Image (cartoon, rainbow, N blue to C red):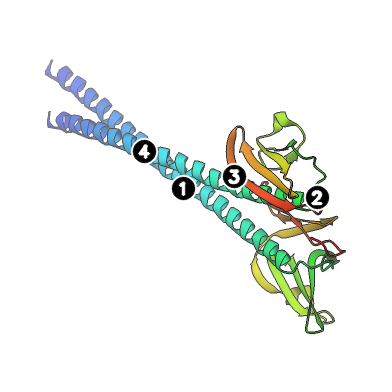
Amino acid sequence: MKRNHSAGLFLMEMIIVILFFSICAGICIQVFAKADQMSRKASNLNHAVVRAESIAEEIRSGSGKADGQTYDTYWDSDWKETADPSRAEYSSRIILSTDQDHMETADIRILKGEEILFSMTADHYLKP
Amino acid sequence: MTGKYTKAKSDRTGVTTTFNILLFMVFILCTLFTVLIGAKVYENIHTRNENNYSDYVILQYVANKVRGADRAGSISVRDMDGTPVLNMEQDAEGTAYVTRIYAYEGKLRELFMKSDADLKLEDGLEIADCAGLSMSVEGDLLHLEIAGPDPEKLTIDLKCADREGGS
């Protein structure tokens, strides 16, 4: 009788412990997932900044791109350039404009889908 | 009658004990898996952050060096014993100096010397850990790429001064 009673007590104790553990594990896994997501975001931002910088340098070197046009570049999930937009996970959108003082302005946006990862504006003086 | 009752009771107690032990095992396994998942996630985050940080720092270091030494025709890429070397020439008080940046034996190295000095790749000052640094020049654009096991390779293009002297 006494043995059965202690087994029941242990069962109750275990159920309470497992319940508490499940709640803690749920919170922990949520935190892990969020940390992983933040780390991926940081990595993407790093890549986006360097890509935007490279695009600005290309424009500075005279890309031969026409004024007032929008240019897109696509990258796959490993940030390798691809010509196929359907395989692309990241893209860049560049809008070029030139004012009467010969200042060429490039609006550079690096996107993941429709989400803007990084955007910058680069100015370049064009020799008349 | 009493013997049968006692046997049934003893069986039930056995089942309860087995169930408790199984439940305890499940609990132990769940705890173990949670700890393992956490450790794996932490490892992934740490590796990703470290790669990101070191690759980014190396690229920015080289980019700043190039921008600082950017004179018409002073930047070139050479091949020395199969290793691509970024060569930046400069002139100080009539003496020609050269700065060489390259990845050699898992390290990013830098050599600053007189142009005619006979220094080898292994003589370079170690800057950071770097599996490899590939570089190429296309027109006035210098292309740098960090090599390594990571499929997400960090690359940068840098505009160098025109050979004629404009920028």
Nearest to viewer (mark 2 / mark 3) = 2
Disc 2 and disc 3: Cα gap in Å?
Answer: 27 Å
The residue under the point 25% across, 27% down is B16
**Mark 4 and mark 2, same subunit?**
yes
Check disc 2 and give the amino acid type: Gly
Check disc 4 and give the amino acid type: Ile
Q: Is residue A61 above or below residue B76?
A: above
Chain ID of residue with mark 2:
A
Residue under label 2, please give it: A62
The quarter in which the N terminus of chain A is drawn is top left
Nearest to viewer (mark 3 / mark 1) = 3
Instruction: Compare marks 4 and 3 and give the one earlier in the sequence.
Output: 4
Disc 1 and disc 2: Cα gap in Å?
Answer: 49 Å
**Left or right of B75 on screen, residue A10:** left
Residue under label 4, please give it: A27
Check disc 1 and give the amino acid type: Ala
Chain ID of residue with mark 3:
A
Residue under label 3, please give it: A44
Disc 3 and disc 1: Cα gap in Å?
Answer: 23 Å
Residue under label 1, please give it: B39
The residue nearer to you, when weighing A91 against A11, is: A91
